[in-house]
Image (cartoon, grey):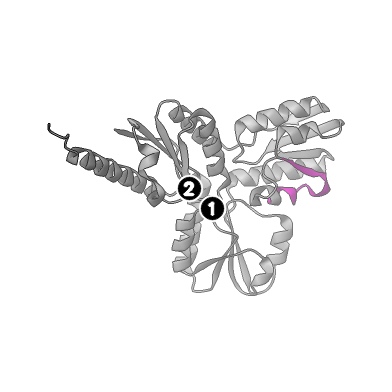
Amino acid sequence: MEIIIAPNSGFCYGVRRALRMVEAIRAQSNEPIYTLGELIHNPQIIQQLEKKGIHSINNPDEISHGVVIIRSHGASPEIFEKLNKPGISIKDATCPHVKKIQNLVKELALNNEEVIICGNARHPETQGLLGYCASKGRVVETEAEAQRLPRAQKRAVLAQSTQDLTVFQKVISALVEKTEHLEVYNTICGSTLARQKSTSALARKVDSLIIIGGRNSSNTNKLFRIAKKILPRTYFVEYPSEINLAMIKEAQKIGLSGGASTPPEALHEAVAVIKNLYKSQQSKEEKVVPCQR
């Protein structure tokens, strides 16, 4: 049996940066600390932060004092305005790449262009981006949605930073047919692209592939869908303890991959779980003695 971890698995730069920022703030301050929404979409990390007194809130109106951290997904200008009041210290952990997309969206909207954001309408990053282009922004999730749009003279299209490249390309193709002049900005971050490519490549050379990460993680779910199309024996687990024998049975090569919010220790723990399952199975097989006649 061989276990292969996909290159680029686990924390991306934006997530590592946000976590370091939170840890530094906790070390320097005794004030209540909150993150606006879960800092990252991973239950293990959220539990660790809770133990350190760092709590997530969903509504800016929930607090009147303390430190509020804007997570790596970013937030809309409206959110910043709501938090800008006496007693609250705002710390911005927005991923630098997401910041660039926010600035791009703002510039495009100022130029009076319709801005199409290819992404998940419910994702906090996308919701934040909409805040920078006001009435000129529109979220398109699928090729079919793009095909239903009316014809337009001019549009700009960009992507949520963790979007599936294939989905983005299909949306672009549909918009080309609906737009006289289409400006395309590939804003998918390099880390996301590298992770999608390495996971796809791994799915083509293993017998079983296990994706590890938070079930509410957008980019981890995309990894799972991408790999599942290539390898039917692809599984999604939130915790390494969820890995079972059926997932690796008769597999000579087992692949592991994780999203941008998957901690490295989760991947290492998954390796240990798989090895223990394999040893347990081998031991059971050795105990089976053929009937002597």
Q: Is residue 132 left or right of residue 2?
A: right
For mark 1, what is the residue?
A: 41
- In the rendered image, residue 168, in percent from the top left (x then y), is placed at 66, 32
- In the picture, residue 180 is in which quadrant? top right
- In the rendered image, residue 155, in percent from the top left (x then y), is placed at 80, 33
Q: Earlier in the sequence, mark 1 or mark 2?
A: 1
Q: Is residue 77 left or right of residue 250?
A: right
Question: Which region of the structure is painted magenta?
Answer: 128-140
- In the rendered image, residue 151, in percent from the top left (x then y), is placed at 86, 30
Compared to 51, does 242 lie above or below? above
Q: Residue at x 82, y 35 (%)?
A: 149
- In the picture, residue 60 is in which quadrant? bottom right
Q: Is mark 1 in CB contact (under 8 Å) with mark 2?
A: yes
Q: Amino acid at mark 1?
A: His
Callout 2: few (<14), some (14-19), or many (20+) C-alpha neighbours within 10 Å? many
- In the rendered image, residue 163, in percent from the top left (x then y), is placed at 62, 38
Q: Residue at x 75, y 45 (%)?
A: 106
For mark 2, what is the residue?
A: 213
